[in-house]
Amino acid sequence: MADPTQKPEEDIIIRTMKGDLEKLSELKNPTKPATGPVVPPAPIAPISKEAQYKVSQAPAPAPAPAPAPAPAPTAPAPAILTPPPPPKVEITPPQPTGKPPILVVPPKAMPAKPLYKTTPVWIKLGIIGLAVILLALSGLYGYWKIFIQSKLPATTNPPISTTTVPTLPTTPMATTTAPIKFFNKLPNKSVTIDLPTKMPTALIQALKSEAKIEETRASIKQLNITNQGKPLTNEEFFNLMSIFVPKDFLSNYENEFVFAYFSQKEGARPVLILKIKDKELAKNQMAGWEKMTLASDIFPLFLSDSKLPKTLQSFKSYLFVGQPVRYLNANLPFASLNYAIYNNFLIFTTSSAGMFVILQDLTGQIVSQNYLKNLKASINEFVK
């Protein structure tokens, strides 16, 4: 008795790839039906047991017994399709052309560069500020190198000794010479006038302002004239005072001088003292200058706005405490030009009373009032 769940083999249809391909070819290239007799298709062979699978179905009523089918002929094996062989490609070798072959070098793969990062603003500002500072410092160094260091006096450095030799302590040497002592007990007062500029008007104005200050009668007030703290030299003083001297005259005198005021009833009378190097040469210089233009050249020493008369008398002499004095009336009230050479000093005064006081201090001799009265009478009242 057959299994009611088994399906008859006639209900199973088997499809093959060959059949599908034939159907597709018939659809693309239809062919006319053959006029010959129709051959019935061969019966399909039963599927093998490996391709069979059981399908669960609902039980069906038992069919009526059918006659046993006749055995079907075995179907031919499907033909195996093989791909056609590839066409042959003839390779012709390159013909020589006489030129060297061109080698094509493939480009090298460049490594990818990292993207640059944006520099922060504060770093940029710092770099700019540093560049400005360096530029300013280089400019200052160039200015110091060109305009300052080049003007400095060249100094040579002494060789450095590698060994030290013990030495005894020595007294340090003075860098400047001691000032010349022009007086013994004078002056009675000393004043310093520092000029802002080396101009004649500045010096004359300062001297006239100081002359207006009243001092003790018959006293000497010394004026130390400087320019920015440095004393004036003989030549600078004579130039600012517009006092003319013969050629090479000042070379016979030390580079120091004394300018002072002698205070008398009629006002201050200037005094000028120079230190002589060669006394005999100084006497000859004064004798020649006296015969030429001594009165007009030395007249600015009076600090007066008046002028000398056109006709002048010659110089005369008198003795005071044994010292010869040369004098000349200047047509000014209680004023006269006096000069004397005592030891190594050349003394100019603008009044006879001033010469008396200066010579008494230098010689150390003191005279009486009667002596002075007799002296004035003998010189014919030259002080008027």
Image (cartoon, helix red, strand yellow):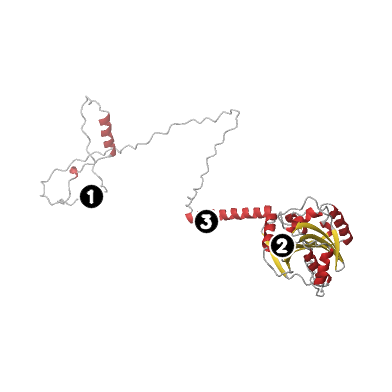
Q: In the displayed structure, would residue 379 be above or below residue 66?
A: below
Q: Position of residue 350 (x, y in %)?
A: 77, 61
- Could you tell which of marks 2 and 1 lies nearer the N-terminus? 1
Question: Left or right: 332 with respect to 125?
Answer: right
- As helix, strand or loop, the secondary structure at mark 2 comes to strand
Neighbour tally class for label 3: few under 14, some 14-19, many 20 plus, Cα within 10 Å: few
- As helix, strand or loop, the secondary structure at mark 1 comes to loop
Q: What residue type is labelled 3?
A: Gly
Q: Residue furthest top?
A: 35
Give the quarter of the image for residue 260. bottom right
Q: Which residue has dot 1 on it?
A: 53
Gap in angstroms between the C-alphas marked 2 and 1: 145 Å
Check the picture and name the quadrant holding the C terminus.
bottom right
Gap in angstroms between the C-alphas marked 3 and 2: 56 Å
Residue 182, visible in the rendered structure: no
Q: Which of 90 and 126 is in front in this view?
A: 126
C-beta proximity under 8 Å, tags 1 and 3: no
The residue mark sitting in front, 1 or 3, is 3
Q: Which of 342 and 82 is in front in this view?
A: 342
Q: Where is residue 333 in the image (x, y as percent from the top left)?
A: 74, 60
Q: Where is residue 109 in the image (x, y as percent from the top left)?
A: 51, 44
Q: Which mark is residue 374?
A: none
Q: Which mark is residue 126?
A: 3
Give the quarter of the image for residue 79. top left
Q: Which amino acid does label 2 sit on?
A: Ile
Q: What residue type is labelled 1?
A: Tyr
- Could you tell which of marks 1 and 3 lies nearer the N-terminus? 1
Q: In the displayed structure, would residue 5 be above or below residue 88?
A: below
Q: Which residue has dot 2 on it?
A: 225
